[in-house]
């Protein structure tokens, strides 16, 4: 047997041991989506402005038809916006000022593409 270094799975997920099961599940789904890139089937497109803002949790939520929900953290929105701005600067392009991420339902296998404008207001 070889000695494999133990991995901190919380660090792999970008989470901490104090995160809730729902938060861990969401982080796992986001990591899986990054691996799959654009090959993931998307059920529909949702505007960030149409999602419900949860001030306590600092997340946007949207109900799924299964009764579950789609969750996008404020941090994810900011990170994706910054990443895309950097990509645009490096490539010398401008994509019309829209950003987005694919988000899985926290209960079923459906996913949506959440999009927003660079001009959106933060809470």
Image (cartoon, rainbow, N blue to C red):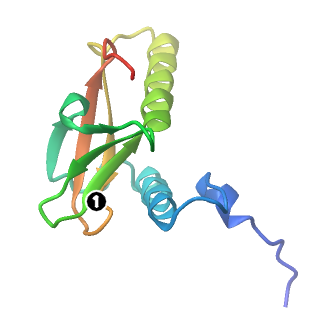
Q: Position of residue 80 (x, y in %)?
A: 45, 31
Q: Position of residue 95 (x, y in %)?
A: 30, 16
> Which residue appears farthest toward the bottom when viewing the image?
1
Of 21 and 108, the residue lying toward us: 21
- Residue 8 vs 86, above or below: the answer is below
The quarter of the picture where the C terminus appears is top left
Residue 23 is left or right of residue 44, and the answer is right
Q: Residue at x 31, y 46 (%)?
A: 102
- Residue 122 vs 74, above or below: the answer is above
Q: Residue at x 86, y 84 (%)?
A: 2
Q: Residue at x 50, y 35 (%)?
A: 75
Residue 15 is left or right of residue 41, and the answer is right
- Specify the quadrant of the image occupied by residue 39: bottom left
Reading the image, the residue beneath label 1 is: 105
Residue 115 is left or right of residue 19, and the answer is left
- Specify the quadrant of the image occupied by residue 4: bottom right
Q: Residue at x 48, y 58 (%)?
A: 23
Q: Residues within 10 Å of mark 1 (few under 14, many from 20)?
A: many
- Specify the quadrant of the image occupied by residue 96: top left
> Which residue appears farthest toward the front when viewing the image?
56
Q: Tag 1's secondary structure?
A: loop
The quarter of the picture where the N terminus appears is bottom right
Q: What number of labels is visible?
A: 1
- Residue 113 vs 25, above or below: the answer is above
Q: Position of residue 81 (x, y in %)?
A: 43, 24
Q: Position of residue 34 (x, y in %)?
A: 45, 50
């Amino acid at each position: 047997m070889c000695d494999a270094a133990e991995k901190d799975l919380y660090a792999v997920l970008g989470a901490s041991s104090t995160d809730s099961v729902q938060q861990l599940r969401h982080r796992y789904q986001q990591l899986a989506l990054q691996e799959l890139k654009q090959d993931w089937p998307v059920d529909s497109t949702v505007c960030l402005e149409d999602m419900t803002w949860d001030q306590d949790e600092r997340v946007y939520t949207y109900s799924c038809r299964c009764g579950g929900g789609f969750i996008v953290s404020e941090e994810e929105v900011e990170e994706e916006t910054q990443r895309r701005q950097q990509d645009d600067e490096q490539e010398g392009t401008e994509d019309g000022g829209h950003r987005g991420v694919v988000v899985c339902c926290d209960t079923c296998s459906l996913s949506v593409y959440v999009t927003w404008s660079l001009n959106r207001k933060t809470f």
